[in-house]
Amino acid sequence: MSSGIISKGARQLVDELQGGSLEASKVFETYRKRINELTKLNAFITSLEYKPNARKEGSLYGLPLAIKDNISTEGIRTTCASLMLKDYMPPYDATAVAKLKAAGVSILGKTNMDEFGMGSSGENSAFGPTRNPWDIERVPGGSSSGSAVAVSARLSPAALGTDTGGSIRAPASFTGTVGFKPSYGYVSRYGLIAYANSLEQIGVIARTVDDAALIFGVIRGKDRFDSTSTDAKPVSSNTGRLFSGGHFKGALLPQLSDLVSKDVREAFDSSVAKLDSEGIEFAEERVEELELALKSYYVVACCEATTNLARYDGVRYGPVADPSRDWKSAISESRTMFGKEVKARIMLGSYMLSSGYYEEYYLKALYIRRNLKLRLLKLSESYDFIYTPTMPVLPWKIGEMIDDPLQVYLSDALTVIANLTGAPAISIPIALKKGLPVGGQLQGRYGLDDRLLELAATISGLLKFRGEPSI
C-alpha cells in the first residue's frame, strides 16, 4: 500500500531527519497531502498547515504527530468531538504536547473521537463517525478512533490518545496498530480535558512497540501542574532485547473466555500456542474480583464524568446561557449541546451519587476496585504479564450496535482492568481474521512500564504480524 515517507515508522523518520536525508517540511507535507486524500475516513476534526518548529536540537525534530482532540493545544481548536466545545481555543498546551513541541515535533492536527471520550466505537462524535481503514463500513474502536485510524492508514507516523477504559487499546486492536496505556501518573494529565480523573491516562498509538516507546520516552515524567504525576526512569534504549532468549511467564484469565467471540478466541489461542512453542510459559489463574470489574468501572467512570462535566453550564464553559432566563432553564438549554451518550452517562452518574444511592453504588464500586488492585498486584509477583485478547469481538459495522449499548459496554470487559488498577497495558496486533485485525493485550505491574514495553516488543517479534489496510 505505502511507499516512501509514509512507509517509514517514527524512529526511522527521526533518524533520517536528524541525519539530513529528509527535510521536516517535506515529511509534513507528504502526510498532509494524504490526510486530504483520505477525508472519507474522518480521522481528523482539525488538520493544520506546516509550521516550522524552531527546536532543531530536539530529539524528535521534524517528526509530525497527530493529537487526540481532548488534549489541549494552544491556539488550536480543541473540541472533544462535542458541539459544546466546537469553537474552544485552549490558551495553553497540555504538558504532553509541550514536551513534544520542545522535542521538535510538528502537529498534523486534532483527531476525531467519541465525544468527551465516552464510547468504544468511534461513532459518538458530533463531527460524524470515524471509519476503519480495513473496512470503511466498520467501526475503528474508540474513543481514540481518529488517532488509531491516522496511524493505521498512514496519515501520521504516531499519535497521542487517551485511555479511560481501553480507549487507546480498543482502537489499536481494531486497526492493527500498537496502543500503549502507561501506568497511571507516568504521563501528566495537565491539559487533558477531564472525563474520569482517576481512570484516564494519556498514551501513544504507533505502528510498532519501539515507536510507542520512543514517544513515551518524551512525554513521561513528573509535572508540577499535575499532583497525580510521578517520576519515572527513562525508557530502555534496547526495547525488545532484554528478554531475547530469556524465560518469562504469562497469566491467562480463562473466566473471561465466555465474553470472547469464536474468531477472536481462535486467533488468541493460536498466539498462545506460538508463544508457548517459543518458550514462554503460561498458566491459568482465576481472579474472582474480575466478575464485577466492568460494573465497578462504569459506576466510577459515570460518577466522575458527572462531576467533571458540571462545568459545562453556559457560564464557565459551553454556549453562553441567556442571562435573562432563570438559571435552571439556562443551564438545561446549554446542555442540549451534549450528545446522547454523554447525557446518558451524566444522568447515570447523578443518580448513583444521589442521597441514598452513593453508598449502594459508588462506595461499593471503590471497594471492588481496591480488592481487584490488591489481587492483581499479588498475581504480578508470580507472572511477568497478564495476557488476554484486547477486544472480545471483531470490529462491527457502523450503526449496528446503536440500539444495543449494553453490547458495546461489554466490549470493554478486557480493557477496563488496567484502568481500575492503574497498571500499564499495551495492545499489539496478533492476527487477521476475516480480513480484520485482532489485538492481544499485555498488562504489566504498576510502574514497570519499560519492562512491559520490552516484553511486548519481544512477543510482537515472535508473532510476526504482517498486514496493513489496502486503502
Image (cartoon, rainbow, N blue to C red):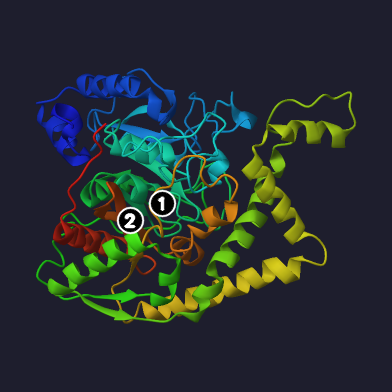
Q: Position of residue 33 (x, y in %)?
A: 28, 19
- Residue 354 seen in this snapshot: yes
Which residue: 22% across, 41% down? 468
**Label 2 sits on what residue type?**
Ser
Q: Amino acid at mark 1?
A: Ala
The residue at which mark 1 appears reads as: 170
Quadrant for residue 378, please give it: bottom left
Horizontal arrangement in the rendering, residue 208 relative to residue 145 (left or right): left
Q: Nearer the viewer, residue 299 or 58?
A: 299
Q: Residue 193 location, x and y as percent? A: 55, 41
- Where is residue 267? Give x, y as percent: 27, 61
Q: Residue at x 47, y 38 (%)?
A: 94
Instruction: Inspect this view and state whether residue 227 appears.
Output: no
Q: Residue 332 location, x and y as percent?
A: 80, 36
Disc 1 element: helix
339 left or right of 52 in image: right
Residue pictured at 45% horizontal, 54% vertical: 166
Find numbered disc 2 in the image and state the secondary structure of the residue it sits on: strand
Q: Earlier in the sequence, mark 2 or mark 1?
A: 1
Above/below status of 390 relative to 191: below
Instruction: Report which residue position mark 2 lands on.
Output: 427
Horizontal side of 110 relative to 134 (left or right) equals right
Which residue is found at the position 46% from the left and 45% from the top?
Answer: 142
> Are dots 2 and 1 in contact, CB under 8 Å?
yes
